[in-house]
Image (tube, rainbow, N blue to C red):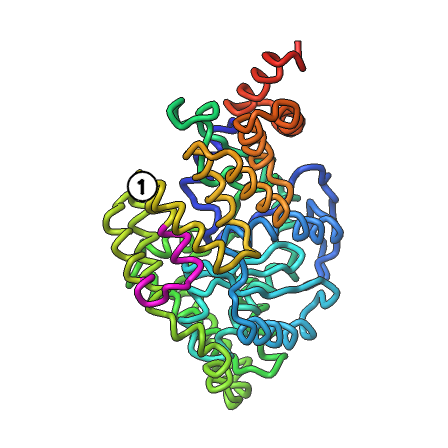
């Protein structure tokens, strides 16, 4: 599969859905290891240090693509407290677990192999109590503790590399005709999914961990029933999640059987509904906004642009200062060909949440298309400061500098881009400019 095919595949599958990214790059197969869970021999493709390094390199990128952590100190603190309660009961307590709640609207949670876990606001507002939250976190902890990501690489079930995608959208766009939204579809990584056996093991471990931590086992039943119900009610919103992590009546029934037998005594415990409701109150108040964003994103993905715009308008009427809604409306306006309006929404998103990178990237791309290279460079450079390492941003900064007449600095950025990417139209453009300016022969 070439870079263009891979980029198209990633775009179709939406990298931010219920899928796990992990670094492939320089990691060599580590061979056999002892399972932290069962004690038997497992074939792994990453050492524990590799797993931690994956999280350090990829989790910030992915969390930003899911629009960054929510600006709600209470819910952030609360997730950390529930997570820490579980951390002490797992097989690998030494891993650097973390539990940010993300601004993404889709219903999901995911984890990187070292324990950096993302929980979307879309799923959090649908849970009913703390026991269901503990089940959700416990399931993801199960994947980490069973080393499922490391095993999949060891089995050669994931291959290498991903792509930085730069699209050329016509010379009329200005500055070489190179602008796009989402300059980097992912870090050096590839999507994959867990097997059904992996999912069953994560379920079992998650239920064990939550019971060890003092929760009623029935919380796992409630979580899986919620997801099964939502799959039936709104399959388009959950399609990618369920295609890679199928929730089924079988898994729900297994959780119920364990709750009624092995863990029956635990079900007398308090599920923590009042505590959950108190700590998630501010987020649950904007549930209609989140649901409107969900419908808008579904319409946007289906290229129903007017319908998407209407849903984002609903979201913004309800919560005008919502970062995600403003950024999504900016993307929608761009898709409708209204870049001036799109830039206005992107700038509003920047003002709402200046510490999050995606609005800066979108504003920079839109400014570049509007032939304002200085503004474009400022926004792209801010993105680079917040989330360094995106080769596509390096390239677009070069385009901005070229538009500003700063040839030498532009050449430095093009050369930096070419050190990381030698294929594709962006590389051809960068190489052509360096040759034209006499830096290459």
Q: Nearer the viewer, residue 280 or 354?
A: 354
Q: Nearer the viewer, residue 185 or 437?
A: 437
The picture quadrant where one finds residue 23 is top right
Q: Position of residue 375 (x, y in %)?
A: 51, 40
Residue in view at x 54 percent, y 88 percent = 265
Q: Position of residue 393 (x, y in %)?
A: 57, 37
Residue in view at x 47 percent, y 77 percent = 280
Type of secondary structure dominating the magenta stretch: helix
Q: How many marks?
A: 1
Q: Position of residue 124 (x, y in %)?
A: 46, 69
Characterize the local packing of mark 1: few (<14), some (14-19) or many (20 or more) Cα atoms within 10 angstroms: few
Q: Residue 74, relative to residue 155: is it above or below?
A: below
* Quadrant of the drawing holding the C terminus: top right
Residue in view at x 52 percent, y 29 percent = 3
The picture quadrant where one finds residue 416 is top right
Compared across the picture, whether 332 is left or right of 277 comes to left
Compared across the picture, whether 419 is left or right of 70 comes to right
Q: Nearer the viewer, residue 6 or 357?
A: 357
Compared across the picture, whether 130 is left or right of 113 comes to left
Secondary element under disc 1, as helix, strand or loop, is loop
Would residue 220 be seen by someone viewing this image from the given angle? yes
Q: Residue 378, relative to residue 131: is it above or below?
A: above
Task: Single out the residue that lies furthest toward the top.
Answer: 441
Q: Position of residue 373 (x, y in %)?
A: 51, 33
The picture quadrant where one finds residue 378 is top right
Magenta residue check for 343: no
Task: Single out the residue that lies furthest toward the bottom.
Answer: 268
State the residue position of label 1.
Answer: 338
Would residue 157 be seen by someone viewing this image from the given angle? no
Q: Which residues are magenta?
A: 315-329
């Amino acid at each position: 599969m070439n870079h263009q095919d891979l980029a198209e595949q990633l775009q179709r599958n939406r990298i931010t859905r219920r899928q796990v990214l992990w670094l492939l790059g320089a990691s060599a197969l580590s061979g056999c290891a002892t399972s932290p869970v069962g004690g038997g021999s497992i074939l792994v493709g990453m050492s524990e240090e590799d797993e931690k390094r994956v999280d350090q390199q990829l989790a910030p990128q992915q969390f930003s693509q899911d629009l960054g952590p929510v600006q709600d100190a209470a819910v952030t603190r609360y997730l950390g407290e529930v997570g820490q309660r579980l951390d002490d009961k797992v097989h690998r307590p030494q891993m650097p677990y973390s539990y940010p709640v993300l601004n993404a609207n889709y219903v999901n949670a995911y984890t990187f192999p070292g324990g950096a876990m993302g929980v979307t606001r879309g799923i959090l507002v649908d849970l009913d109590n703390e026991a269901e939250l503990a089940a959700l976190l416990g399931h993801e902890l199960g994947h980490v503790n069973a080393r499922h990501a490391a095993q999949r690489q060891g089995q050669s079930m994931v291959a290498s590399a991903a792509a930085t995608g730069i699209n050329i959208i016509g010379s009329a766009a200005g500055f070489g005709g190179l602008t796009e939204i989402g300059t980097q579809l992912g870090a050096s990584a590839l999507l994959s999914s867990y097997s059904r056996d992996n999912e069953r093991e994560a379920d079992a471990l998650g239920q064990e961990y939550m019971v060890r931590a003092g929760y009623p086992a029935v919380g796992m039943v409630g979580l899986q029933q919620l997801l099964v119900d939502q799959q039936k009610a709104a399959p388009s919103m959950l399609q990618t999640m369920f295609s890679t992590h199928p929730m089924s009546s079988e898994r729900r029934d297994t959780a119920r059987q364990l709750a009624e037998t092995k863990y029956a005594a635990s079900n007398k415990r308090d599920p923590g509904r009042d505590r959950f409701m108190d700590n998630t109150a501010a987020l649950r108040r904007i549930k209609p906004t989140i649901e409107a964003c969900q419908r808008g994103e579904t319409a946007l993905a289906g290229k129903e642009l007017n319908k998407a715009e209407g849903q984002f308008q609903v979201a913004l009427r309800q919560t005008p200062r919502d970062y995600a809604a403003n950024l999504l409306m900016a993307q929608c306006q761009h898709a409708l060909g209204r870049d001036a309006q799109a830039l206005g929404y992107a700038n509003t998103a920047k003002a709402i949440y200046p510490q999050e990178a995606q609005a800066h990237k979108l504003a920079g791309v839109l400014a570049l298309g509007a032939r304002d290279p200085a503004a474009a460079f400022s926004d792209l450079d801010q993105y680079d400061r917040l989330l360094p390492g995106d080769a596509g941003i390096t390239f677009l900064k070069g385009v901005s500098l070229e538009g500003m007449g700063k040839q030498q600095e532009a050449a430095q950025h093009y050369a930096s881009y070419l050190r990381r990417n030698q294929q594709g139209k962006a590389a051809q453009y960068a190489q052509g400019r360096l040759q034209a300016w006499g830096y290459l022969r």
